[in-house]
Amino acid sequence: MKRLTTYYFLLLLGLNMIFAQYLRFAVSEFKNGLQNMLEGKPLPLATERLIQFYWWPWMCVVIYGLGLMASLIGKPNDSILRNVLICILIIELLGMFVTAASFNLPWVLITWKLGS
């Protein structure tokens, strides 16, 4: 484990495991709270999709695990692994942004309707 990319994959693997566990519990509590607050009114589509696909960070965990194994084996070049890592991070950050926006969208709509 002399390669720095190995440590990057290991760090991101651990952080994503923590994030995936947190998201599972957060979506569960969020869903229960919204059902009580909205009293049966429909949720925005993005929020419904978030509740259905709360497991998406586990895909990143698998990809980082594969990258860690590839880095440990040492078969691909280190620069190729770094480029793959950057692409995965960009896609994951986009997913995290959509997740945060989906969590906040019901509150924005509730506030907007109350203000009107």
Image: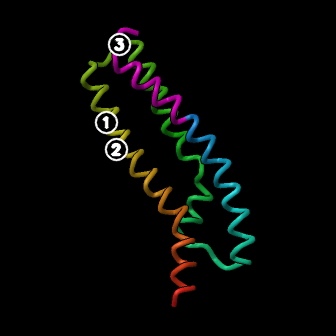
- Residue 12: where, in percent of width, then height? 46, 31
Three-letter amino acid code at the position of disc 1? Ile
Asked whether 12 or 63 is in front, the reply is 12
Asked if the residue at tag 3 contacts the one at tag 1, i.e. Cβ–Cβ closer than 8 Å, the answer is no
Three-letter amino acid code at the position of disc 3? Gly
Residue 74 numbered mark, or none: 3
- Residue 34: where, in percent of width, then height? 68, 68
Residue placed at 61% from the left, 73% from the top? 43
User: In the rendered image, which quarter contains the N terminus?
Assistant: top left
Q: Where 69 falls versus 112 (above or below)?
A: above
- Asked whether residue 104 is drawn in magenta, I would say no
In this figure, which residue is indicated by the disc labeled 2? 90
Is label 3 in a helix, a strand or a loop? loop
**Viewer-side label of 3, 2:** 2
Is label 2 in a helix, a strand or a loop? helix
Q: Where 47 falls versus 14 (above or below)?
A: below
Three-letter amino acid code at the position of disc 2? Ile
Predominant SS along the magenta part: helix
Residue 52 numbered mark, or none: none
Question: In terms of sequence position, does the residue under pointer 3 or pointer 2 come before the other?
Answer: 3
Residue placed at 65% from the left, 47% from the top? 24
Magenta segment: 1-16
Q: Quadrant of residue 31?
A: bottom right
In this figure, which residue is indicated by the disc labeled 1? 86
Mark pair 1, 3: CA separation: 18 Å
Residue placed at 52% from the left, 86% from the top? 115
Asked if the residue at tag 1 contacts the one at tag 2, i.e. Cβ–Cβ closer than 8 Å, the answer is yes
Q: Seen in the image, is 82 located left or right of residue 100?
A: left
Q: Where 22 falls versus 106 (above or below)?
A: above
Is label 1 in a helix, a strand or a loop? helix
Asked if the residue at tag 2 contacts the one at tag 3, i.e. Cβ–Cβ closer than 8 Å, the answer is no
